[in-house]
Image: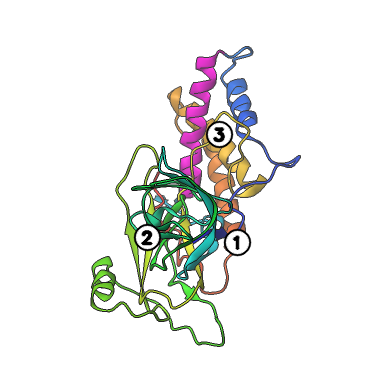
């Protein structure tokens, strides 16, 4: 159950793109810090992320009121595979109950499922470490490079930056069979379907499920489908991205070089605000640049896919 993104959600390194450390340098220059301390740089990074969150929301003034814009680059098309047993080869260590696969076949949604190992038997997956490493409840002896298989399931993990499905997922044509349109239902409805029937068939329903928040992984989500797929099915969907904050490493804001300029002015405006400068030159410039960026971004939508208005597009993008 491997999630594959099919849209670029980051800015590639180029002569025109500014990395986060370069943006921090610009804010330090604005503050007059010729030789910034570690504390100065940390402060500048905080202001940069203040501006980044604001720019990601597309926050701007429209008709004298605050409005928001949902950027096309925060609405990528992604695809994932649901159903079908995951197979591969793996080795196990009894002392730690850890099983390591030679290829990426594991998924966090497999915790609690059964893994069948040739010449070893059935093992219950009790913990997920990575797409190649899991923990099992009990492992009597070591094994090396054995064929493994994990049972088919109607559960698949969604990307770590997942912020909600924006359009009903579409199942792709598979094995000369038709694929029904998926209808969104509650998680309880999917669970009832699983309880009442263990037959495998093309999925007809889906539910978005939020997992319990943990400090280690943050907020994570799963997609549940019913019936449990009769075979591996490719599902494509458009989702809303919850972008991670910039760090002091060489990371790039999403949206490309043009949007990076919007982020820079938003960060500069945050510095102005810290000096109690309201509606200063950088705030004015930010408003001009974000308005221009919104007009350019409108051309990135397919017909009928754009938000009806900037005010309507505040679709949960608050940081």
Q: Which residue in the structure is indicated by mark 1?
A: 6
Mark 2 crowd level (few <14, some 14–19, many ≥20, 10 Å Cα): some
Using the image, determine if residue 13 lies above or below residue 73: above
Snapshot quadrant of residue 94: top left
- Tell me how far mark 3 sits from mark 1, CA to CA: 35 Å
Q: Which residue in the structure is indicated by mark 3?
A: 282
Among the two numbered marks 1 and 2 on one chain, the one whose residue lies closer to the N terminus: 1
Mark 1 crowd level (few <14, some 14–19, many ≥20, 10 Å Cα): few
Snapshot quadrant of residue 18: top right
Residue nearest the observer in this picture, 79 or 114 = 114
Using the image, determine if residue 186 lies above or below residue 148: below
Magenta-highlighted residues = 37-59
Residue 40 belongs to the span the image colors magenta:
yes
Residue nearest the observer in this picture, 214 or 36 = 214
Mark 2 and mark 3 in contact? Answer it, CB < 8 Å.
no
Q: Is label 1 or label 2 in front?
A: 2
Tell me the tag on residue 114. 2
Snapshot quadrant of residue 129: top left
């Amino acid at each position: 159950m491997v999630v594959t993104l099919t849209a670029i959600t980051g800015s590639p390194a180029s002569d025109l793109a500014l990395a986060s450390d370069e943006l921090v340098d610009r804010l330090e220059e604005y503050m007059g810090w010729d030789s910034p301390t570690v504390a100065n740089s940390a402060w500048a990074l905080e202001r940069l992320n203040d501006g980044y969150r604001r720019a990601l929301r597309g926050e701007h003034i429209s008709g004298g009121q605050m409005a928001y814009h949902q950027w096309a680059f925060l609405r990528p098309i992604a695809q994932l595979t649901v159903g079908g047993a995951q197979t591969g080869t793996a080795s196990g260590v009894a002392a730690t109950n850890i099983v390591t696969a030679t290829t990426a076949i594991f998924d966090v949604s497999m915790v609690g499922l059964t893994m069948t190992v040739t010449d070893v038997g059935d093992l219950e997956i009790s913990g997920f470490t990575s797409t190649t490493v899991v923990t099992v409840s009990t492992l009597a002896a070591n094994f090396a490079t054995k064929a493994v298989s994990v049972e088919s399931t109607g559960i698949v993990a969604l990307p770590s930056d997942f912020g909600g499905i924006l359009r009903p997922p579409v199942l792709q044509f598979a094995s000369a069979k038709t694929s029904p349109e998926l209808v969104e239902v509650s998680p309880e409805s999917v669970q009832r379907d699983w309880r009442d029937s263990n037959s495998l068939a093309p999925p007809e329903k889906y539910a978005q499920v939020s997992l319990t928040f943990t400090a280690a992984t943050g907020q994570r989500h799963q997609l549940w489908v019913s019936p449990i797929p009769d075979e591996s099915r490719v599902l494509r969907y458009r989702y809303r991205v919850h972008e991670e904050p910039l760090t002091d490493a060489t990371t790039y804001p999403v949206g490309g070089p043009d949007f990076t300029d919007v982020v820079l002015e938003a960060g500069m405006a945050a510095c102005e605000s810290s000096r109690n400068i309201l509606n200063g030159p950088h705030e004015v410039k930010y408003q001009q640049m974000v308005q221009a960026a919104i007009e350019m971004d409108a051309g990135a939508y397919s017909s009928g896919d754009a938000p009806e208005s900037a005010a309507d597009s505040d679709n949960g993008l608050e940081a």
